[in-house]
Amino acid sequence: MRSKKRIGILTGGGDCPGLNPAIRAVAKTALFCHKAEVIGLFDGYEGLIKNRTKKLIWEDVSGILTQGGTILGTSNRANPFAYGEKKKDLSKQALKNFRNLRLDALVCIGGDGTLHIAHELTQMGLPIVGIPKTIDIDVEATDFTIGFDSAVAVATESIDNIHSTAESHHRVMIVEVMGRYTGWLALYAGVAGGGDVILIPELSFDIKKVCRELIRRSRIGKRFSIVVVAEWVRLADLKLVVKRKVKSSTDPIRLGGVSYRIAEQIENLTGLEARVIILGHLQRGGKPTDFDRILATQFGKKAVDLVMKGKFGYMASLQGGEITSVPIQSGIARQKKVTPDLPLIEAAKAVGTCFGD
Ligand code: F6P
């Protein structure tokens, strides 16, 4: 390697608040502490496949700490191993571009999909370091991922705001949150926002038990209820409510809308009036929380440390309050799911939250 390193950086997959603070931390640490060159790749792996890049200087990453989104853009369609609708293998082209760019390392900031690709590219010999981000927090081997806390904050505020209108109209308000195949976001936002019922995919629920709780609340004079629903929950028929399929995406399934079916069943079984609010991409918008800014700053610095040590194939990780690193493979080995014995579930049940299980 040259003494002055060239470090590439990209953000892949669904965006979330905290990406810009992470880009800033990687770039500033590299520029300031190591006098390295930093090359931003646009739109995730698309930038690597199509060679769309920009040299980042201090001014480019200054003033972005508080901004949501990503100045580099992102994509969840650009998989070098299965590109586009025809799923073409463009990994060799990606490798060639990496060499032509004379990069010594590539920092990939992303969730499950981006880290999987990062791992595969590492197997091909690319010197890659990962930074885990996702509002779904479904990456193993790290306590938190960038973006989760900000999404919880948005969802919690929304649940707070729903309370007054729910109470005025004596309605059951069903708030559907994202989270893909896990219930982390629904659980955290549901507990923080005081949801009366929380439904997550990891705990199968009985709609009759949910309705009994709603009627019980109504009878004791609580004339409204908030039900927080994770987008991947299934009703008794086990059918997944798929909103659409995105052909060229690494994971084509887009969820959303199960709450309408839940609302219908609640109205039929209880006679109570129900309304549905799907928070959707609002949860990925806005400013990163202080927690995400701090996490992203530490992850960014850690990623550059890993690059300087030549510790490739690793990702930054938070474990028990410590910033550390783990093999990317251990982060993606399986999806991190909520378990029924999680202390947060026990605490929620202890204060009377119903999970319908
Ligand atoms: O993985 C992040 C996430 O926001 C999920 O929670 C959600 O199911 C999905 O992405 C939405 O994807 P898209 O932005 O492609 O609609």
Image (spheres, grey):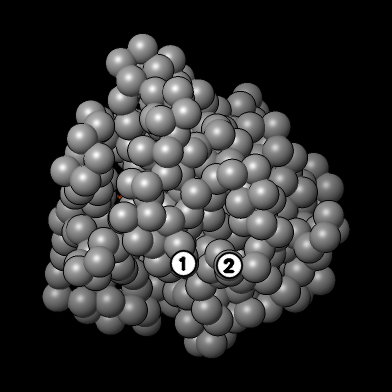
Say few, some or many: other residues with alpha carbon within 10 Å of mark 2 (under 14 / 14 to 19 / 20 or more).
few
Residue nearest the observer in this picture, 233 or 132: 233
The type of residue carrying mark 1 is: Glu
Q: Please name the residue that numbered disc 1 is placed on.
A: 202
Q: Is residue 160 left or right of residue 3?
A: left
Foreground pick, 67 / 283 = 283
Callout 2: helix, strand or loop? loop
Mark 2 or mark 1: whose residue is earlier in sequence: 1
Q: Specify whether residue 193 is in view.
A: yes
Q: Residue at x 31, y 55 (%)?
A: 208
- Residue at the image point whose x is 42% and y is 38% from the top: 216
Does residue 125 sit above or below 18 in this rendering?
below
Q: Please report the residue visible at 31 percent of the width from the left and 25 percent of the height from the top.
A: 171
- Mark 2 to mark 1 CA distance (whole Å): 8 Å
Q: Name the residue beneath numbered marker 2.
A: 340
Residue 17 is left or right of residue 233, and the answer is right
